[in-house]
Image: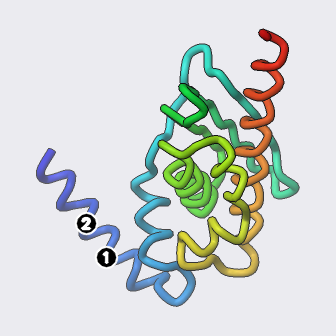
Amino acid sequence: MEGDDNIKKIMGTLLFKETGRLYSEKVIDYGTNPRNCGTLDRPDGYAKVTGPCGDTVEIFLRVRKEKILDIRYTTDGCMTSHAAVSAATEMARGKLLRECLKINQSSILDHLGGLPDESQHCALLAAITLHKALRSFAVGKTRKA
């Protein structure tokens, strides 16, 4: 395992040297070491959205006491898609639902230190999917009441 961590660190350094003009260190970190990647069984909120680029993002929420207790995602997208959705999930984890409504394309881009123009749609796709998952939770909660 320690050898794997060293290899990842070396690869990340090389990738940053090659793409540093395009991607921030944070984008490369989130894109190559995604947080919260995976699924949740029986989520409290769920959304699946395919963007105009063809990437599909799924977000799964576990909510307790109006807070995001756990959040997971899947995507079939590229490194920048992983970076954007991973960042959105990190920004949402542990937050009140109403705070998560403030997570949008702009705040994700700020969190990541920006993305090239041709990749900024990844942050929008992440934000839209998160908001749809929040809406899914709200609708399900209303139906149960």
Q: Residue furthest top?
A: 144
Residue that label 2 marks: 9
Q: Quadrant of the N terminus?
A: top left
Residue at 63% over, 72% down: 109
Secondary structure at numbered mark 2: helix
Q: Which residue does the image show at 64% across and 43% down from the upper left?
A: 75
Q: Can you give x and y, in whole percent of width and height, for residue 99 in the image?
A: 64, 51
The reply to whether callout 1 and callout 2 are in contact (CB within 8 Å) is yes
Residue appearing at x 40%, y 79% in the figure? 16
Relative side of 100 to 53, left or right? left
Residue corresponding to mark 1: 13
- Farthest residue toward the bottom? 21
Residue 46 on image: x %, y % = 71, 29
Q: Secondary structure at mark 1?
A: helix
Residue 13 position within the rendered picture, expressed as x and y whole percent measured from the top left: 31, 76
Image location of residue 62, percent across then percent down? 56, 26
* Residue in front for this viewpoint, 85 or 23: 85
Query: Which residue: 78% across, 9% down?
Result: 144
Amino acid of disc 2: Lys
Residue 85 horizontal side relative to residue 132, left or right: left
